[in-house]
Image: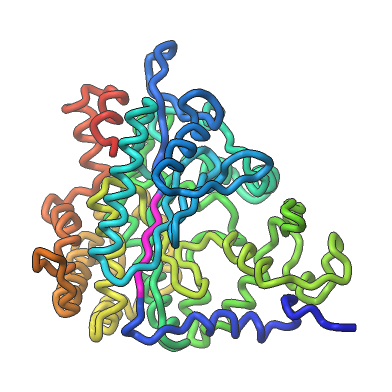
Amino acid sequence: MKMNIDKIQDKEQLVSWFRSGFKEKSKWMVGTEHEKFAYTFSKKKKRYIPLSYFGENGINAFLIELCKFGWLPVYENGNIIELKKEAQSITLEPGGQIELSGAPLKDLHSTCKETNEHLKLVKEVGKKLDILLVGLGARPNEFLKDVPLMPKARYDIMRNYMPSKGSRGLEMMHSTCTVQANLDFESEQDMKKKTSLAVKLQPIVTALFANSPFYEGAFNGFQSLRKHIWTDTDPDRCGILKIALEDDFNFSSYVDFALSVPMYFVIREKKYIDCSGKSFLDFLNGKLDILPGEKPTFEDWENHISTIFTEVRLKKFIEVRGADAGNWRRTCALPAFWVGLLYGESSINSAEKICCDWTVEEIEKLSLDVAKKGLDAEIKKEKVLNIANELLKIARGSLVEREVLDSQGNNESGYLNVLEEIILRKSSPAKELMEKFSNKYNSNFEELMKDIAY
């Protein structure tokens, strides 16, 4: 009997799959992914409401309009659920959040140009269809029951399973937005250094980008409610990637971790099969009861690891995923911060000195604290504000040293300016927003949303 070469036979093939992502430093790229909420104004309710999928100015109409600009539609059960254009894609999150998954690009100038072009386009299309696009970490003024559901089969499976693991999984799915960066590695040791450092510093990023102080029409008591919601979503697949802080962390241990994460689904003949709660290790061993005797493909594996939601996640690159969505400047600043720290010759070592003695327990506590306290949170009696300031100095120096110039002769360090302004004000985006809500917007969410929209 001829063996199907697409089937995974053992764990070592999964380890080799990660190693196939190695890139020499001269070929390192950076990718940016960012989500935004879509709203339309309801004359009946006299407020902005989340965009439904169907309707004259629904998300389906929005996606159809984008197709006029060279984007190609991807269908599921007759509905457009994704757009593709070269190495970019526009996808739908469960509650209609619209995400750009940017292409891997050579430098920060290119990824920021891509971000700006995307935001300009969706704003133009949104204006035509009376759609408002907003960058916040959490929905400010509506309840979960008011959020329309997107017609994607994988989300139906997740909706059924999530409440069995935590009380806020459905809120995470439908009512949060983030921005993330994707970064390369040249070796297993390089991956280990970058991933470990990213796990340690992720709470600092959460504080710098905290931008979700409202929920259900009121202050919610948090600066990053998005982060807080994640703490009660699914402990099997969310939170801090603790194994990255262990001395023997490598691809093999990450594979073991990924195999321990319960499955959601497999896809066969373009249909989703509900495997929620089942073991991928059983699948690897040909013992998955839903598909008896069958072994997984690499597509099955890629789908599975995409359902791991730790703040730092491994694929054939590193994803750093723990920042609230925000305005275009902060969207460009997020990859700049990480490239500055993780791509420099000496910046990794300099940053590591700041956090080398942080314990897992301290990092976990800090991760919880920054959701509420933001830049005022502390670790080892040191304020996050001061740590962030030191890290920004390291990142800026590294980006200056990279000497990657745009057409005007500017290096990449300028993308950090918005973060340095936050440090100078000693105030996170969330605190700024709360102050403006009371003063500039007279506690009116419609005025706030119009003003901060892209």
Can residue 168 be seen here? The reply is: no
Frontmost residue, 356 versus 260: 260
**Was residue 277 drawn as part of the magenta stretch in this picture?**
no
**Was residue 32 drawn as part of the magenta stretch in this picture?**
yes
Can residue 219 be seen here? The reply is: yes
Kindly identify the residue that appears in the image at 65 percent across and 45 percent down: 76
Which image quadrant is residue 123 in?
A: top left
The residue lying furthest to the left in this view is 409
| Picture coordinates of residue 378, whole percent (x, y) | 28, 61
Frontmost residue, 451 versus 228: 451
Residue 42 lies left or right of residue 283; in this view the side is left
- 24 over 317 or under it: above or below: below
| Picture coordinates of residue 119, whole percent (x, y) | 31, 45
Q: Which residues are magenta?
A: 29-34
Kindly identify the residue that appears in the image at 46 percent across and 26 percent down: 57
Kindly identify the residue that appears in the image at 79 percent across and 78 percent down: 4
| Picture coordinates of residue 51, whole percent (x, y) | 47, 30
